[in-house]
């Protein structure tokens, strides 16, 4: 039911409300409530006449003006359905009053952490991905998380979950939210000497064209090393997104752009993209001769 439909419903209830003592004042208690999704809160109504006397045994009709966020029973029990600011209306003797009920999202009760590699080489930058779910098993988007390492000299971690492998050894990476936490173990290997490459190094395209950048790495002995590039872009009018480790570039405006990929704590590789405006290239061809 939309908000407009709810307004019509309240108006209809006002019109058909049975004859009873007309209250001069209606008060809903509490004036403001706050509950989590699936939780309930009971609202009550007090009605007074013009002399301030409490009117008893009045018929109260409850309406959820935002039914997508909360429902309300015939006796004023509100149930949170989805996060947001719900509005509940009580109709008494042809008069109505409304209150707001804050519906909070369920907090995370479970965290699952996955790391790009649990045996990285020293000097590598490795991401940790965390998924959070609530007690109903539903995903929780954007939880506030704190990160820590048992030994930052071996593997440090920043506030975004990027791990910086620094020297051989073992370390525990921990991540926590409100009353929930998890951890994972890393065994950092000695740096074998890694060289990084980014392709293409230079490209010329037109606006709207897509370029896919590929980041690779290998040891001095020729062993391929999996990398997890962190992409960045200089200049406005273009964007780059990660797609399975590749950097997907597209520009809406002409210009020269530098695409950078950080693959090691001290290693950043860059490529240049020169973008020209996409025009309507046309050649004038004379088909005949006529009088003007």
Image: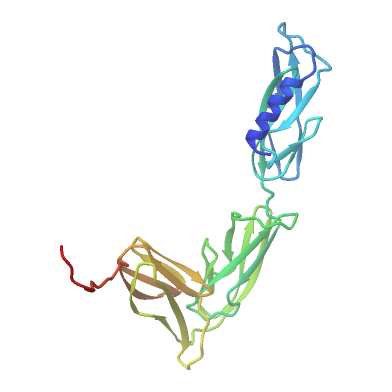
Q: Looking at the picture, does residue 221 appear above or below residue 85?
A: below
Can residue 119 be seen?
yes
Q: Quadrant of residue 5?
A: top right
Q: Nearer the viewer, residue 185 or 56?
A: 56
Q: Quadrant of the N terminus?
A: top right
Q: Quadrant of residue 32?
A: top right
Q: In the image, residue 220 lies at what x, y percent?
A: 45, 91
Q: Residue furthest front?
A: 291
Q: Residue at x 77, y 20 (%)?
A: 17
Q: In the image, residue 254 lies at what x, y percent?
A: 30, 65
Q: Residue furthest left?
A: 292
For residue 44, side relative to residue 241 (left or right)? right
Q: In the image, residue 106 lies at what x, y percent?
A: 69, 49
Can residue 30 be seen?
no
Q: Looking at the picture, does residue 61 appear above or below residue 275?
A: above
Q: Looking at the picture, does residue 102 appear above or below residue 59?
A: below
Q: Looking at the picture, does residue 130 appear above or below residue 25?
A: below
């Amino acid at each position: 039911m939309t908000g407009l439909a709810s307004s019509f419903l309240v108006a209809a209830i006002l019109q058909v409300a049975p004859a009873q003592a007309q209250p001069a004042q209606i008060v809903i208690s509490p004036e403001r409530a706050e509950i989590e999704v699936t939780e309930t809160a009971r609202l009550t109504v007090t009605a007074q006449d013009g002399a301030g006397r409490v009117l008893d045994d009045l018929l109260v009709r409850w309406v959820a003006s935002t039914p997508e966020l909360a429902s309300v029973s015939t006796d004023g029990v509100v149930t949170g359905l989805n996060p947001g600011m719900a509005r509940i209306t009580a109709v008494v003797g042809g008069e109505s009053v409304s209150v707001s009920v804050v519906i909070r999202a369920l907090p995370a009760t479970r965290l699952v952490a996955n790391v790009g590699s649990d045996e990285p080489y020293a000097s590598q930058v490795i991401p940790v991905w965390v998924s959070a779910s609530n007690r109903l098993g539903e995903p929780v988007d954007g939880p506030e998380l704190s990160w820590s390492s048992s030994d930052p000299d071996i593997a440090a971690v920043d506030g975004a979950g990027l791990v910086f492998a620094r020297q051989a050894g073992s370390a525990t990476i921990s991540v926590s939210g409100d009353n929930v936490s998890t951890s994972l173990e890393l065994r950092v290997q000695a740096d074998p000497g890694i060289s990084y490459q980014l392709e293409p190094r230079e490209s010329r395209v037109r606006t709207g064209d897509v370029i896919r950048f590929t980041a690779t790495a290998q040891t001095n002995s020729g062993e391929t090393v999996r990398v997890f590039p962190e992409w960045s872009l200089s200049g406005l009018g273009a964007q780059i997104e990660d797609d399975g480790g590749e950097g997907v570039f597209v520009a809406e405006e002409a210009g020269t752009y530098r695409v950078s990929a950080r693959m090691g704590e001290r290693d950043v590789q860059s490529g240049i993209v020169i973008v020209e405006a996409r025009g309507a290239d046309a050649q004038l061809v004379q088909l005949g001769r006529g009088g003007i």
